[in-house]
Amino acid sequence: MYDSIIIGAGLAGLSAATELVRAGREVLVLEARDRVGGRLENGTLSNGQVVELGGQWVSEAHEQLLGLISDQDLELIGPSDGDLILKLHGQVAKLPETSEAEHHLTPFEFADLGQGLLRFRRLADRVAQNPVWTQANSVWLSQTLTQWISSNLRTEGGRSYFTALATRALGVDAATATLLDSLGKAGEGVDLEALVAVNGGLKQRRVRGGVAQVPQNLAAALGDAVKLSTPVVGIDYDDDRVVLVAEDGQQFEARTVVCTLPPRMLLEMTFEPALPSERVQLAGKVPPGNVIKAFLAYDSPWWRRSGASGQMGADEGAVRVVFDTSDEATGKGVLMGFFEGAEASGYGKLSVSLRQRAFEEAVEGAFGAAPSEPFEYLDRDWLSEKYTRGCHGAHFAPGLWTTGGPLLAQPLGRLFFAGAEYATAFNGYMEGAVRCGREVATEVNELLG
């Protein structure tokens, strides 16, 4: 019998397993896929360049993830220099790297935007520092971010600009995300103002060779304790032990189990005894994110000739966010973009060639016509991935995390839950997965004694 079995070899599962092994526990990690990493995955272009099909960005506030990157001697690289392209209401504008956003808004609109950013930042600080005030104003804080923007910014230009910044920097849908959840994202170190700063980009970096190297290295250190291609379909638990049933009929017994599957995927497993009805209902209300992450590879980063950084944000279209992820060593130009939400659902049903053309049109609309055709297109439709069923992460409807999130993360006897969706800090981020995995490992150690 194992001390603990971890279901899932993503960041949360491998972080938990690493901590438990360090504590002298006998651990087994069961992963359904034939690889580790979960929603972190590397792909390779025909020229040998590695691209990140899953999670990618590392923020300055992601201290524990940065610690792992440093311990593994991995290199961080920043965004490319140049102007940010912002496409709103069909109009293309540039945000120069010298922070001259005021040149593209009227003086009144720019002042309105600045005042809105200041109010939002102060409110985020208040929420983070004063839980009593936050609780007392919970009803007001449950309004959508769009409602708050409409009430606090006076100009249409300021509102549109603020909405685009929030969508890109916080990763939220302003029309459905609550003000409280949005403020929480800002309080975790996500900086809206950074989009109006040098390079027009977030204070985020990526790992040369892909952040997927982090879970790969963690798994390598665990050795034979990681078992791939072993989907778990059933969990039988009581006060003394937990028995896991794999898809091929194998059974594994442990004193404790840490499940790192997203809430929605729990509904595809059999539990004995059954999960409490309130947890089942909550899991059913947390649909997965819907993203197709795509790459266009050109012979050169031609967009830089006009001073563009390769970063683009738009309020409409099939691909609304684009980044330059070129590898300077190869000299080739690579743009990464997202089909998200309804666009991802629709384009996921179309051919790869049609998705490529839609991405090319978005690029042309932002940076102009390319001097030559791309030599390669590559994408990953995460909604169609059998053992993921969506990315970036689960989508918590307005108010759902504050009312039900903690319940989803509560252990059931010897059965624990960890992952980005269960994290109380940096929820939905890689940092949240690492922290949650380590925190749950501490709880498991305490139970084991």
Image: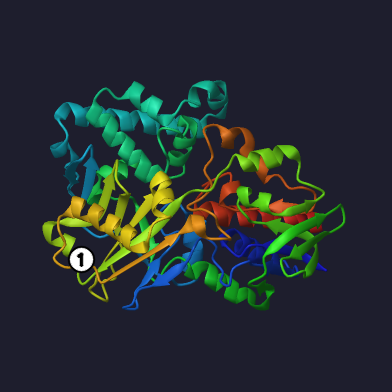
- The structure's colour scheme is rainbow
- Viewed as shown, does residue 219 lie left or right of 348? right
Image quarter where the C terminus lies is bottom right
Percent of width and height locating residue 25: 75, 67
- Viewed as shown, does residue 334 lie left or right of 268? left
Q: Amino acid at mark 1?
A: Pro
Say which residue appears at 15% left-offset and 30% top-offset. 106
Say which residue appears at 70% left-offset and 64% top-offset. 20
User: Which residue is at the far right?
Assistant: 240
User: Which residue is at the far front?
Assistant: 350
Say which residue appears at 48% left-offset and 57% top-offset. 382
Instruction: Relative to 276, say whether 149 is above or below.
Output: above
Say which residue appears at 49% left-offset and 63% top-offset. 40
Percent of width and height locating residue 163: 33, 35
Residue 326 makes an appearance in the image: yes
Residue 336 makes an appearance in the image: no
Percent of width and height locating residue 258: 70, 57
Percent of width and height locating residue 260: 64, 56
In the structure shown, which secondary structural element does the residue marked by tag 1 occupy?
Answer: loop
Between 267 and 138, the one nearer to me in the picture: 267
Instruction: Relative to 275, say whether 437 is above or below.
Output: below
Between 20 and 83, the one nearer to me in the picture: 83
Quadrant of residue 76 within the rendered picture: bottom left
Q: Give the labeled residue for mark 1.
A: 301
Crowd band around label 1 with a 10 angstrom C-alpha radius: few (<14), some (14–19), many (20+)? many
- Viewed as shown, does residue 175 lie left or right of 14? left
